[in-house]
Image (cartoon, rainbow, N blue to C red):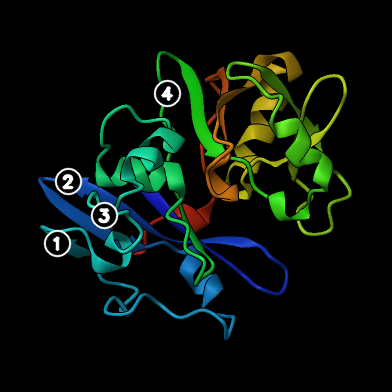
Amino acid sequence: MKLYLAWREPKNREWITVGALWEKNSEYHFAYTKGVRKALESSNFTPINGMEDIEKLYKSKELFPFFKNRILNKSRPEYGNYLSWLGFKSPPSALEELVRTNGLRATDSLQLFALPKSIENKYIIYFFNHGINFLNEGYKKRLKDLKEGEEIYILKDIQNRFDKLALALRTGDPIEILGYIPRFYTKDVNKLLELNGSSGVKTVIEKVNLNAPAQFQLLCKLESHWHKEFKPFKDETFELITKD
């Protein structure tokens, strides 16, 4: 499993892929991607503390502190509820947890997401809806009526001034906006919609967590045919500066 680290530029809110984390031969590896050079053009971005050399391949038997700090300690009293919110029946690996939560922290503008892989010729991703801070009170009321397994629908937000590829999520009748597909997936999902058609991409409610923090209340699952012409994250910013 390979995870990418993305940083959000504060002015235009663009997500820029700056690094990659993966496990190999019982070691954790981290390397910066070519996108970090674009991020460094902004005075707001600085490399990870202790990992400042962008051309170095970092290896460690233990998960790097920067990422370990984004994992909930199993001794925390809310850990059982936390696993349920994430949709896990047993404790996940460190990387599985980081994928599901995106490694969210309130203190920075960095998130993690996984490189999708073909599973029985299918593209499948799980994610919590984004953009909930911009929704009205109707969203909270509708959330109580949503059922696990219920299909929801993708709505292209073509006049979004921050992301021309933005994809909103909505319910069926009556229509209510539920938030957005995370921006780092929108280019790929738009491509799948183009290749497979609107009926070839299905999104359902995986889990509703009314008692969870807002960012963990609505877990979604998106599934589509893995088209032969499709390749995820086909962008130079995802390429490693230093090869493993």
N-terminal of the two: label 4 or label 3? 3
Q: Is residue 3 above or below residue 192?
A: below
What separation in Å lies between label 3 and label 1 (alpha carbons)?
20 Å
Q: Is residue 45 left or right of residue 69?
A: right
Note whether residue 234 is visible.
Answer: no
Q: Does residue 15 lie above or below 120 as drawn?
A: below
Label 2 packing within 10 angstroms: few (<14), some (14-19), many (20+): few
Q: Earlier in the sequence, mark 2 or mark 4?
A: 2
Quadrant housing the N terminus: top left
Could you tell which of marks 1 and 4 lies nearer the N-terminus? 1
Which residue in the structure is indicated by mark 2? 24
* Contact check, label 1 and label 2, Cβ < 8 Å: no
Residue on which disc 4 sits: 118
Q: Are marks 4 and 3 in contact (CB under 8 Å)?
A: no
Residue placed under numbered mark 1 in the picture: 60
Location of mark 3 (residue): 73
Q: How far separated are the C-alphas under marks 2 and 4?
A: 20 Å
Question: Three-letter amino acid code at disc 4?
Answer: Ser
Which picture quadrant has residue 240? bottom left
Q: Nearer the viewer, residue 149 or 7?
A: 149
